[in-house]
């Protein structure tokens, strides 16, 4: 038995050495230069790692631990270089800081780098050359631990390759932050930006101001209510929901990150997004206003630091002193975004400051604020980063701008000779949907699928070469209003961070979406072993439907992000198997059916199955008369929008919704002749955070002459808190009756519990 097994393994080595080709190498981000050669390097219990310094040993331990878990053995350190079967580190001071060269031969692996950063990346590349099972936490048998002989010369295109985690809107603990650091390193990312301060929670221990975390880190629990519908809290009510990181924990994070070539950038927001600090120390605000830590969305943000009082600056300087003692990073991020400065307009302290400093308006006062803080931070040997609002009223002399409201702020700042980090919300906000909203957990509106991230470029075409030099790189930002668990956080980050990593690391010319999609499955397989709850949204087929009401039909187009996707579909709720129809052109639908579609690979559906239940009914394309007109921003596809067969999605901007603000919806449908009917269905959406509420009452009436109406049913539905975005069909059934006219009245809630005007949203009225 034993003999046979050995022979088989030997045979496998021979075969595998022959078949490894460039196309089988699936490294993300793609290395700048890679040459595949004949043969393989075989890892074994006898493989030695020649590490000469303690740091080199520390760096190599991660890979050794992977071997230990997946194989039961591990390469060992050695000071002496054996004849063959070893990994060697070499230092070449002529290389760039993060560059590395990897020479893999059947005899040895040599990683050459200027310093540890490059060695770390060389090891991460070896990791991705190994079988995906190297990520296994349990022992894997019968696997041949080889990597192809390659010659790689690699270095990043950008020096800033970041991810921002928002720890304020929902708190994430040290363990998750450290896990995230590992995952960043795997993708050769090098910045973790921690958003530690915001209205809904102060997340960093400051010893001189203990109330920041005693009070500011805790909010009244309204997690059952959708973020933007949460009510203002009584400042005297004790907060119980939240948390914070101690200075010790943060130091541990920073120390661990350094072993992965990751700098941790703290963000201490000012002058706005600081309700949590004002809740703890009201004297920091213009009018000493007592507020509670908000449980959810705050807009506009008017409770901000007073820019007139000296004690604001004393406080902030003290805070910065403690922050600097924790974070060795060159940069301190001081926020600066979204300050509504109405209090500054009337505050005597702020007005006095403006007079004394000769400031013309509150924008110049914000600029004064930022410049003063920059001066302090510079005096400590650190540089300042701010969101692009810091351009307003004049940029601080040495500030680096994080451009989030598009790339314009970045273009302007680079024109002024300032460094820029690109984080436009159009491509870099990972809190935004990555798939069709109906299939996704609640997120920010908009659509940033994997392809869109992949096609991002931090350097904008219109920039001069001089401006382009100021683009340090980019980062993905995950705002956490809707991110309540580590699983959700992972879902929004991965695999989009893989696409972002390639944007930031690989040469622009090497970037190729088709090629990326062939390497992605290997990364996802690694994520599976690592237990990362990544999104599979990119594999989902989505549909775009168009109504052709003159012919009483709709056409459904199916699409997917992958090139030459093999999409197949079935109608009438049939099984989606190898009999499914290959999709080539839009599908014409003329009657009620259930459409199912999926991406196929080797004749089998992969990813999630797309299902669309299409219902034809008696009111299709019939004339509607509304008592109150629908809202001008939500017209669906015109007067027949509610009888066009096509249903709306949770994306209320999808062009299928008609809306009424405060008004009730009252409509008469003319079926053109008397018909036997027994049911009226009203399709509605609720998204309380966006001010959209289900009706509180729905009534249906029928008539033969359009004058005398008979009520055939009603639904009473009092307001109820809903923490989700929800689609619902309200059905009113009655005895079969002949009628030509159907009237539906839906009553608007009118005012939300927060006191805001409420919308009704409808996509279809089905008459059967
Ligand atoms: C931001 O998204 N307010 C920076
Ligand atoms: Zn003030």
Image (cartoon, grey):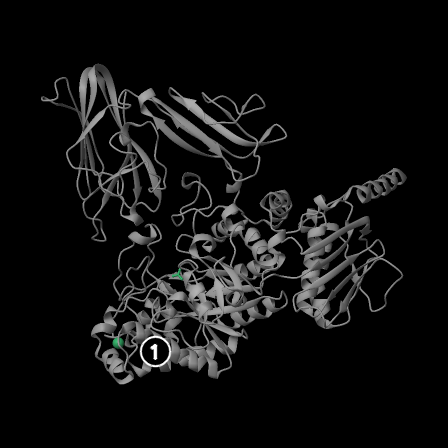
Q: Residue at x 24, y 80 (%)?
A: 349
Q: Which residue is mark 1?
A: 368
| Residue 312 shows up from this direction | yes
For label 1, count other residues whose C-alpha is less than 10 Å away and answer few (under 14), some (14-19) or many (20+).
Answer: many
State whether residue 208 appears in this view.
Answer: no
Residue 661 locus on image (x, y percent): 21, 44
Measured along the vertical axis of the image, is residue 128 above or below residue 541? below
The C terminus, quarter of image: top left
**Quadrant field for ligand 2:** bottom left
Tell me where residue 201 appears, x and y as whole percent.
Answer: 38, 64
Q: Nearer the viewer, residue 674 or 731?
A: 674
Local SS, label 1: helix
Picture residue at 45% right of the left edge, 54% below the top: 429
Picture coordinates of residue 386, whole percent (x, y) = 42, 69
- Relative height, residue 647 to residue 499 (above, below): above
Compared to residue 560, the image places residue 252 above or below, namely below
In the image, is 109 to the left or to the right of 167? right
Q: Quadrant of the N terminus?
A: top right
């Amino acid at each position: 038995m034993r003999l046979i097994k050995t022979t088989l393994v030997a045979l496998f080595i021979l075969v595998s050495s022959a078949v490894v080709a460039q196309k089988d190498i699936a490294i993300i981000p793609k290395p700048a230069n890679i040459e595949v050669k004949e043969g393989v390097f075989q890892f074994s219990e006898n493989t030695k790692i020649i590490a000469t310094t303690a740091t080199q040993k520390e760096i190599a331990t991660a890979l050794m631990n992977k071997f230990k878990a997946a194989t039961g053995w591990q390469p060992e350190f050695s000071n002496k270089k054996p004849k063959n079967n070893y990994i060697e580190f070499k230092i070449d001071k002529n290389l760039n800081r993060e560059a590395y060269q990897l020479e893999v031969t059947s005899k040895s692996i040599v990683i050459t780098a200027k310093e540890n950063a490059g060695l770390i990346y060389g090891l991460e590349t070896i990791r991705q050359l190994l079988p995906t099972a190297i990520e296994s936490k349990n022992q894997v048998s019968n696997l041949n631990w080889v990597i192809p002989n390659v010659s790689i010369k690699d270095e990043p295109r950008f020096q800033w390759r970041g991810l921002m985690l928002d720890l304020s809107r929902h708190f994430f603990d040290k363990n998750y932050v450290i896990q995230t650091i590992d995952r960043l390193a795997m993708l050769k990312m090098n910045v973790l930006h921690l958003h530690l301060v915001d209205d809904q929670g102060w997340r960093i221990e400051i010893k001189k101001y203990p109330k920041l975390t005693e009070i500011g880190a805790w909010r009244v629990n309204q997690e059952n209510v959708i973020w933007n519908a949460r009510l203002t809290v009584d400042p005297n009510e004790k907060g119980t929901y939240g948390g914070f990181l101690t200075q010790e924990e943060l130091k541990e994070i920073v120390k661990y990150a350094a072993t992965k070539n990751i700098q941790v950038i703290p963000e201490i927001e000012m002058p706005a997004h600081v309700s949590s600090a004002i809740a703890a120390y009201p004297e920091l605000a213009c009018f000493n206003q007592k507020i509670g830590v908000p449980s959810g969305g705050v807009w506009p943000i008017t409770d901000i630091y007073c820019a007139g009082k000296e004690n604001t600056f004393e406080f902030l300087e003290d805070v910065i002193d403690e922050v600097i003692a924790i974070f060795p990073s060159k940069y301190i991020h001081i926020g600066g975004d979204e300050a509504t400065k109405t209090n500054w307009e009337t505050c005597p302290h702020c007005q006095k400051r403006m007079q004394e400093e000769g400031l013309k308006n509150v924008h110049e006062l914000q600029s004064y604020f930022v410049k003063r803080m920059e001066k302090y931070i510079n005096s400590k040997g650190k540089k300042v980063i701010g969101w692009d609002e810091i351009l307003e009223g004049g940029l601080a002399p040495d500030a680096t701008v994080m451009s989030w409201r598009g790339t314009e702020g970045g273009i302007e700042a680079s024109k002024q000779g300032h460094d820029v980090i690109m984080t436009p919300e159009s491509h870099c906000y990972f809190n935004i949907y990555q798939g069709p909203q109906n299939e996704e957990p609640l997120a920010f509106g908009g659509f940033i699928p994997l392809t869109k991230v992949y096609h991002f470029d931090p350097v904008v075409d219109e920039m001069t070469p001089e401006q382009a030099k100021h683009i340090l790189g980019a980062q993905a930002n995950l705002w956490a209003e809707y991110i309540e668990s580590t699983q959700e956080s992972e879902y929004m980050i991965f695999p989009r961070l893989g696409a972002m990593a390639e944007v930031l690391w690989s040469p622009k010319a090497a970037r190729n979406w088709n090629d990326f999609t062939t390497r992605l499955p290997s990364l996802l397989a690694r994520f599976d072993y690592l237990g990362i709850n990544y999104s599979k949204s990119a594999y989902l087929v989505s549909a775009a439907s168009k109504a052709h009401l003159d012919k009483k039909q709709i056409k459904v187009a199916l699409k997917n992000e992958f090139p030459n996707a093999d999409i197949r579909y079935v109608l009438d709720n049939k099984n989606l198997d190898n009999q499914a129809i290959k999709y080539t052109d839009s599908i014409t639908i003329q009657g009620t059916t259930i459409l199912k579609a999926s991406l196929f690979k080797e004749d089998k559906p992969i990813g999630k199955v797309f299902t669309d239940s299409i219902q034809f009914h008696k009111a299709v394309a019939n004339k509607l008369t509304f008592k109150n007109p629908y809202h001008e921003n939500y017209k669906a596809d015109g007067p027949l929008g509610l009888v066009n067969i096509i249903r709306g999605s949770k994306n209320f901007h999808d062009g299928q919704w008609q809306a009424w603000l405060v008004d009730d919806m009252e409509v008469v449908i003319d079926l053109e002749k008397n018909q036997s009917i027994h049911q009226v269905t009203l399709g509605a959406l609720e998204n309380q955070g966006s001010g959209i509420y289900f009706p509180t009452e729905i009534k249906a009436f029928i008539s033969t002459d359009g004058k005398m109406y008979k009520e055939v049913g009603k639904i009473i539905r009092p307001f109820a808190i809903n923490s989700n975005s929800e689609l619902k069909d309200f059905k009113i059934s009655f005895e079969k009756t002949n009628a030509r006219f159907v009237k539906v009245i839906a009553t608007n809630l009118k005012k939300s519990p927060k006191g805001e005007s409420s919308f009704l949203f409808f996509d279809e009225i089905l008459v059967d």
